[in-house]
Amino acid sequence: MSASMSRRVVLGRLAGGAACGVLGLGACRRGDQSGARKIGVHTVGFTLGIQTPAIAAWSELLGEVPGYGPANITRLDRLPVITQSIISGAGDIGDGDILTTLRAIRAGADLKIIGLSYHSTGLVIVAHKGRVPTAADLAAEGTVVAINSRGDFTHVLLLKPLHDAGVDPARLNLLEIGGSGDRMRALLAGRVHAVPVHLDQAAELLTQGDFHVVIEPWQVFPSFPCAVLFCRGAWLADPANRPAAVALVAATMRGFRRANTDLDWFTDRYRTYATRPDREKVSAETLRPLWETLRDRVRAWPERMELLTPEAVRALVPFFRQADALPEEVDIERAIDMTVMDDARRELDRDA
């Protein structure tokens, strides 16, 4: 072997090792992907059960598509930062929330929503049983409800349950606390009486005091296309990029399908990609209740992304506006490019 060939081999192996460190074990389960396109995906800084199928899809299943390698995944701590990074061209496709994306579009950003990274939410509202026996009691005098920030998704989650109960949401006494871990500690310390936390955390929290789940968003919102994939419109219009968008969305659909049908696959990927420190110790039977809830009740992984429609998004807008999160109208039909999902579905049908 020549010296130059040896150097290429060594550099390739070093690059592969770096990819394992950044993306996790799944990115390195296949052979050399030299020359394959790696789509830049910007996502949140943590992975829990609801995000696991999409992360596994981008890290593994996308690399099974001819011409593509595992995605280059960049983790960012705040949703607005993800949106800005895509607007600036620092990444190809963003994984953010519907509300932040629509706000950016309304402000003039050239963004298109092209798919889901999951449907609905893994958040629930956990409250002190004695103080908050029902959702209507969240607005009772003296009750303090923690949210991440006013006008964001954790705020919006409260509005429809109160509306349905005939309670004026203006009566809510809200305290902004960033981070579900800090909100949990505030609840345990008695500083607040109700908090939004992730399903993965709620089960643990319920064992630590007289608490119960007072709002399950999937019971309140018939469809909640929360976590969306989006890109710049100009990027998508480039013929070199549109097939990449379709490939990533189709891979995500395949990840949803695997997660829905195979608990062992979901467990293995949870152990690989979840950001919980104890993830490697989790068994399939331990994960089964979470998996069944996400699959059957939350409908977190719609296999053809059929729950992302302009009608479903439009139904959420009144609550976004009530939270002062989206003060002006947005053209929902123009914001969502349904054709990428249509093309991805055709890809799946051809593979079937």
Image: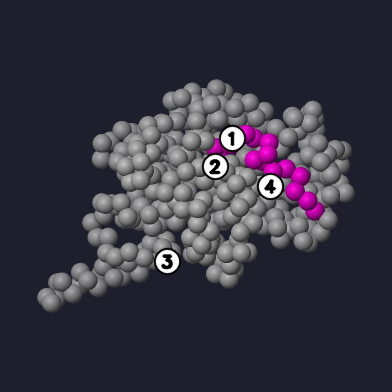
Residue under numbered circle 4: 124
SS category of the residue bearing label 4? strand
When asked about the image quadrant of residue 165, the answer is top right
Residue under numbered circle 1: 223
Q: Nearer the viewer, residue 296 or 217?
A: 296
SS category of the residue bearing label 1? loop
Residue under numbered circle 2: 119
Q: Residue at x 64, y 47 (%)?
A: 123
Region rendered in magenta? 211-227
Q: Earlier in the sequence, mark 1 or mark 3?
A: 3
Q: Residue at x 34, y 38 (%)?
A: 346
Q: Residue at x 59, y 67 (%)?
A: 282
Q: Position of residue 126 (x, y in %)?
A: 74, 49
- Amino acid carrying mark 4 in the image: Val
Can the viewer see residue 22? no
Q: Left or right of 235: which side holds 253?
A: right
Q: Nearer the viewer, residue 215 or 342?
A: 342
- Amino acid carrying mark 1 in the image: Ser
Placement of 223 over or under 263, stated as above or below = above
Residue 25 numbered mark, or none: 3
Q: Position of residue 197 (x, y in %)?
A: 67, 51
